[in-house]
Image: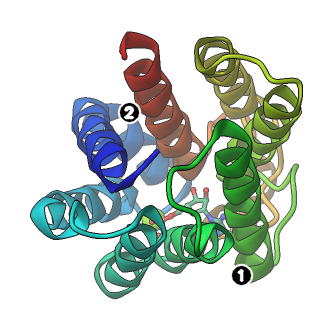
């Protein structure tokens, strides 16, 4: 992975988020305040506008730029969380030139840990972390076992979908939905949905490459 691949993944993510407008919007309307799609779209558009600049940077610097930009453009709870993810990935990859699969898996894990710290949340609280934590764990395990990019991408798509589905019957203990108690049961979490969509987009880009 380098900053060129990062821009390609960002373009794939933008397409996928725009394609899932209805689902994402509807989920945050049901148990949030309905702005999650707008927040995600704003983040995707601003990163798309940075493509030329990003490709001149190292992967680490590109990820840091993305994080800083997201911090100032995505609102809501999710903005600072995604910003922490990218800034922490950047820190982990500082000084590495071309990145291998294990380095990417470790950086992804560090990004997810940064979200946990920033949001003071764990698995099982009906948030994006119910997708991101199992994906990070499987990614690291498979990278350590030297599995191919194709095998990893196929497995991570499945893990992301299972993680998303697991939010359906959870009580929300973080974020806006936490005030709803039992009423949140039966609904998927919007942030978990957008993370599933983004992970599928990146994995599909790996699978066709
Ligand atoms: P807001 O909740 O401020 O309206 P968004 O709608 O953009 O912001 O994002 C909501 C999503 O953010 C939720 O669906 C959930 O996945 C995620 N989220 C909220 N709070 C936390 C937290 N403390 N830790 C992890 N994720 C969280
Ligand atoms: Mg919202």
**Distance from mark 2 CB to nearest ligand 1 atom below 8 Å:** no
Residue 190's x, y, as percent?
Answer: 52, 47
Q: How is the image coloured?
A: rainbow
- 149 sits to left or right of 8: right
**Distance from mark 1 CB to nearest ligand 1 atom below 8 Å:** yes
Residue 75's x, y, as percent?
Answer: 37, 79
Residue 53 placement: quadrant: bottom left
Upstream in sequence: badge 2 or badge 1: 2
Number of residues whose C-alpha sits closer than 10 Å to that of mark 2, classed few (under 14), some (14–19) or many (20 or more): some
- 189 sits to left or right of 125: left
Name the foreground residue: 92 vs 29: 92
Is residue 95 visible to the viewer in this orientation of the structure? yes
How far is mark 2 from mark 1, CA to CA? 26 Å
Residue 84's x, y, as percent?
Answer: 59, 77
Number of residues whose C-alpha sits closer than 10 Å to that of mark 1, classed few (under 14), some (14–19) or many (20 or more): some
Residue at 71% over, 81% down: 118
Task: Please tell me whether residue 109 is drawn above or below residue 64 in the rendered image.
Answer: above
Query: Tag on residue 130?
Result: none
Secondary structure at badge 2 equals helix
Q: Which residue in the structure is indicated by mark 2?
A: 23
Q: Which residue in the structure is indicated by mark 1?
A: 118
Disc 2 and disc 1 in contact, CB within 8 angstroms:
no
- 195 sits to left or right of 129: left
Secondary structure at badge 1 equals helix
Nearest to viewer (mark 2 / mark 1)? 1
Name the foreground residue: 58 vs 116: 58
Is residue 127 visible to the viewer in this orientation of the structure? no
Name the foreground residue: 20 vs 139: 139
Residue 91's x, y, as percent?
Answer: 62, 77
Task: Please tell me whether residue 48 is drawn above or below residue 84 in the rendered image.
Answer: above
Residue at 45% over, 39% down: 198
């Amino acid at each position: 992975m380098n900053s060129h691949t990062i821009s390609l993944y960002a373009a794939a993510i933008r397409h996928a988020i725009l394609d899932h407008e209805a689902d994402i919007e509807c989920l945050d309307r049901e148990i949030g305040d309905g702005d999650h799609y707008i927040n995600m779209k704003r983040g995707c558009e601003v990163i798309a506008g940075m493509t030329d600049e990003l490709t001149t940077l190292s992967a680490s610097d590109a990820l840091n730029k993305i994080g800083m930009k997201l911090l100032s453009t995505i609102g809501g709870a999710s903005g600072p969380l995604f910003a922490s993810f990218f800034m922490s990935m950047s820190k982990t990859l500082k000084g590495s030139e071309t990145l291998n699969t294990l380095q990417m898996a470790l950086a992804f894990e560090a990004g997810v840990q940064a979200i946990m710290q920033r949001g003071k949340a764990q698995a099982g609280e009906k948030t994006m972390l119910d997708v991101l934590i199992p994906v990070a764990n499987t990614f690291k395990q498979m990278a350590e076992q030297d599995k191919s990019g194709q095998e990893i991408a196929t497995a991570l798509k499945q893990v992301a979908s299972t993680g998303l589905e697991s939010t359906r019957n959870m009580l929300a203990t973080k974020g806006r939905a936490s005030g709803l108690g039992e009423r949140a049961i039966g609904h998927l979490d919007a942030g978990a949905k957008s993370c599933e969509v983004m992970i599928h987009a990146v994995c599909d880009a790996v699978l066709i490459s």
